[in-house]
Amino acid sequence: AAIGVSVSQVISKLIQLGIMASQNQELDFENAELIGMEFDKEIVLKSEDEESMEDIFDLDYEDKEEDMIPRPPVVTVMGHVDHGKTSLLDSIRNTHVTKKEAGGITQHIGAYTVRVNDNKIVFLDTPGHEAFTAMRSRGAQVTDLAILVVAADDGVMPQTIEAINHAKAADVPIIVAINKMDKEGANVDRIKQELSDNGLVPDDWGGDAICVPVSARTGQGIDELLEMVATVAEMEELKANPNRAAVGTVIEAQLDKGRGPTATVLVQKGTLRSGDMVVSGVSSGRIRAMFDDRGKKIKKAGPSIPVLILGLSDVPEAGEFIYVTKDEKTARSYAEKAKNLIKADMVKSSSNIKLDDLFNQISDGTIKDLNIIIKTDVRGTIDAVKQSFEKLSNEEVKVNIIHGAVGGITDSDVNLAAASNAVIIGFNVRPSQSAIDLANYENIDIRTYRVIYDAIEDIKNAIKGMLAPKY
Ligand code: GDP
């Protein structure tokens, strides 16, 4: 069905061509080509080894516009430590889970659904941009919208800026929750000023950043915040086709003593059903039971709905895709393929940007943007570097500084680089050991310099394909 023609059409065509075939038989390339010609489609031969998981599962399978229906937004809460991310998530959960649905205990499965008027909103339960970007670096983009929490008595802090840049790099709209409004010293205007200074201009100041004053403690403003989320989500026109084999992402997973491997899955396309055969990375199995965020056993879940599933062979990884397959054999063989892919580490290492190879990547059209993360020892360097770097843009390649901050190079920087295909450049700062390890694993280019001039020369030369190799 990958060429948009039904199996029975193919079989009858084959019979016309004098080839006897049954449904599960593999076509050799010559016959496949013939069939392709018959249906006016070009068949491209792919070697098994080159196949990525995405190809196998036909992730790009285009859903027809008329099959797409609106789906709830998936929201991540981000912001500086202690600004109230967890409190806000708790407050929303406690006040907006309708009484009759609640039935007592809420289950922490990693995400939950709330109802606002007629709309559903799904919240991911792990706050912070670290989890968000770590998932993204594995290819999973589940978040549609970010709530940025800024404490009204504290203001914009380093992790606030990080969160802004991580959300922007992912092209996810941001709604600002100015939290702790119940506290003395809460000052909305000061926060708006600091947000403006960091590229988020409030809408009542002529920009497009929506800011809602709230208090996670008293509940003030929470309804308005949720209504804003629903409004912004509506403008995004989020849609999915519920009538296809389900594809989702594992949000979290663990080994439960009694129940074996469990995973929380956020369905992204299609409908996941109890009894479906699924595969996620090296883990596969038949869904034995499925629960919602209230702990209620359910039979099916459509797009954007988080569910806890039982029945997997192994604990899958958070951020992995999960797919429904037609039978057990297929699921197993895909899981086997995944094991081999991981061994070859093909999925990761091939596509990342490298200054050494930049010119080739530009020439063959693989990249059109050189995304850079800058870490420096002093604040003033960031703007100076940003301007000099961005001036190096030419017709072939655009140089973008996607994040700049003071401090050493951290795991979070490497994850952002992996998620956004960026290189990391440090001035008078070093990467932590764990950032070095992660960068090696993710195949991320980290370069450190003492003077701006040297870095500019390197990037200039890299763009021209004349960079001396790094030793
Ligand atoms: P996180 O690190 O961003 O998840 O922040 P927490 O949710 O853990 O909150 C940090 C501290 O701020 C806790 O002591 C909370 O009780 C407190 N806090 C959070 N929201 C509010 C609020 O709206 N008002 C007041 N007064 N305190 C709050």
Image: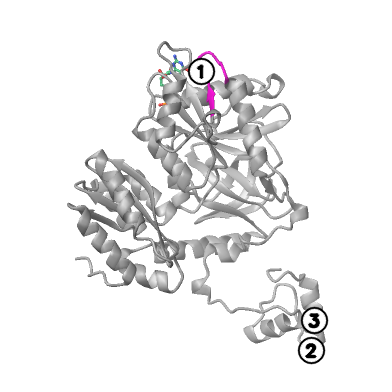
Question: Marks 3 and 2, how far apart in space?
Answer: 9 Å
Residue wearing tag 2 = 18
Question: Marks 1 and 2, how far apart in space?
Answer: 73 Å
Tell me the quarter of the picture where residue 299 sits.
top right
Between residue 436 and residue 317, name the one nearer to us. 436
Between residue 137 and residue 302, name the one nearer to us. 137
Q: Is residue 346 above or below residue 160?
A: below
Q: Position of residue 469 (x, y in %)?
A: 23, 69
Identify the amino acid type marked 2. Answer: Gly
Q: Is residue 323 above or below residue 98?
A: below
Regarding residue 408, the answer to whether it shows in the image is no
Q: Main secondary structure of the magenta part?
A: loop
Q: Residue at x 35, y 70 (%)?
A: 359
Q: Which residues are magenta?
A: 211-221
Q: Position of residue 377 (x, y in %)?
A: 22, 42
For label 2, the crowd category at 10 Å Cα-Cα, with few meaning under 14, some 14 to 19 and many 20 or more, is few
Q: Is residue 6 left or right of residue 74?
A: right
Residue 13 tag number: 3
